[in-house]
Image: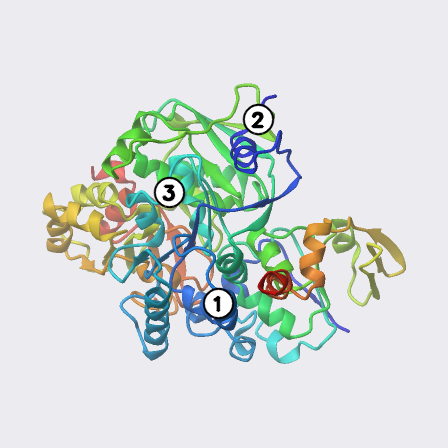
Amino acid sequence: MSETFVQKVLRKRLGVESAQPGQIVTVKPDRLLMHDNASAIIEKVKSDIDRFGIVDPDLPVIVLDHVIPASDEKTAINHRRIREFVRKHGIRHFFDIGEGVCHQVMFEKGLVLPGDLVLGSDSHTCSYGAVNAFSTGIDRTEAAALLLTGETWLKVPHTMKIMLEGGLSKGVYAKDLVLTMIGTIHSDGASYRCIEFHGDIGGLSISDRFTISNMGVEMDSKGAVFPVDEVTREHLDTAGIEDVSPVWADPDANYWSVHEFDMGDVVPVVSAPHKVDNVKPVSELTGLHFDQCFLGTCTNGRHEDLKVAARILSGERVHPSTRLIIAPASRSELVKAMADGTISGLLEAGGVLLPPGCGPCLGAHQGVMAPGERTISTSNRNFKGRMGCKEAEIYLASPATVAATALRGELTDPIEVI
Amino acid sequence: MRVWRYGDNVNTDMLFPGKYTYTCSKPEEIMPHLLEDLDPDFSSGVKKGDLLLVGSNFGCGSSREQPVLGLKHAGIEAIIGRSFARIFYRAAINQGLILIECPSAVDAYKDGDEVILDIGSGRIEIGGEEHRFPPLPDAVLAIRDSGGLLEYTRKRLEPRKG
């Protein structure tokens, strides 16, 4: 019987004959991801943990990344509570401040493998579709219950098939591609459904795939998954993983819908305020002034992204009417970017370097805007108030478009400056 | 009973701004900021038994439990919507907050209409006209009817402990 990726993953784990869309199943995830919100999660079930214990100290992965280093006493207390919990219960997979954004850390430490099922108390947990895992976001209470039981329910989703054809043009990046998809499919177009990427994916690097899977949730998808190929294997080799069990859909699987994108037709785009699916070509808004340019996050803060920006900005100066903030996705990506001169290029151009972590993305600290200001960002959300001020505007774009805009102080098609 | 109406794609930053997510997690800390960037009158005006009537993809964006905790604490009887974003939908079940997907009811409502809800039998009456919605699966109802996921989990773990 023909199956989609997600049907096959769930059927194999459950050891049943079939997993049909709409069916409700009880699953035991391979990993449970938490970040700074682990503090609130632990608090919910403090007395239950004392009474029943943690189901498995190897299940949780905790990464401190959202507000790091602590910005005030309250966040410092949260971090302390998490560190105490980790020590008391022998949690093996704990990464303290500075290691990077949780999703990047999961990915580069090899904590998520092809065919895995990962749940996380963060909506961008869907990122691991890049390495052929079925991973999705849950809320804090569900994470708390998972600490106690190790299991939860899932509805087997229908799947949307996205066919990618051709290749991206010069000056156009994976971010432009995924924003273009979101602009077409819209914010609720993949609700309760899994997305599979098929077609000419060989030209997309592992970092490109991460960018794309990461933003799957901006179409409300339950997961956004790539198959395993040479590109994936190279990444897994780097993480020291050899033995994997990839899973992929059967050629005659049944899909909810099929969508085709010719990558050669994609142009540099932005998501304009205040919705991610409000996608417009850069050419329509050229000249728009930006007060702040932000390069970073789990979406686009990897070495490859910083390098694209440095190629535009090295030997130049950030325009005096704007400012450039850089938050690398992880320590390891930062180290790579230091070794080849990417970081010095960006700093000499006038960039401000933040520690590896979420930085200004969620508006809690570092790079909050004033009313009336406008930021162009490589992050994944431009919701009103997202960066800490509801009277400010956020535009989303590729690292190249952000760098080109930093150079001129106004929205610029990267092709003009590459 | 008041009906609070909101449109499509209301995201979690509008329901509860991200800047408070690591400093507010208890209902009394959440309440003053509930729906702060969507409707500044909500948190002071909401009363027990009120309803929310919303468009599609309500609660899209982050995994952010505070709006669900806040709405439950405020005594919202149910949220009737065209559709809900996935994580928000699960979060509501896990807190025992009732969400009803019923696009025809949302479309039919006019200001001032009387709304009568019969959750058990899957009926909403709006201005005298009946709309039906499918019941939740049993596995999900068991969680909601226990008062939320943690209560449900404790009930299951207790006998194992003996």
Same-chain status of marks 3 and 2: yes
Q: Residue furthest right?
A: B128
**Kind of element beneath mark 3:** loop
Q: Which mark is residue A49?
A: 1
Q: Residue furthest top?
A: A252
Question: In the rendered view of the protein, which quadrant contains the C terminus of chain A?
Answer: top left
**Amino acid of disc 2:** Glu
Q: What is the x, y in percent for residue A260?
A: 50, 26
- Labels 2, 1: front one: 1
Q: Is residue A193 visible?
A: yes
Are discs 1 and 3 less than 8 Å apart at CB? no
Mark toward the start of the polypeptide (3 vs 2) = 2
Q: Residues within 10 Å of mark 1 (few under 14, many from 20)?
A: some
Which residue carries the number 2 mark?
Answer: A3
Are discs 3 and 2 less than 8 Å apart at CB? no
Q: What is the x, y in percent for residue A103?
A: 36, 49
Same-chain status of marks 1 and 3: yes
Which residue is at 56% across, 76% downward? B27
Q: What is the x, y in percent for residue A159?
A: 57, 33
> Alpha-carbon distance for marks 1 and 3?
26 Å
A31 displayed left or right of A12: left
Which residue is at 58% across, 52% downward? B85
**Amino acid of disc 3:** Val
Q: Residues within 10 Å of mark 2 (few under 14, many from 20)?
A: many
Subunit that carries the residue with mark 3: A
**Amino acid of disc 1:** Ile
**Kind of element beneath mark 2:** loop
Mark toward the start of the polypeptide (2 vs 1) = 2
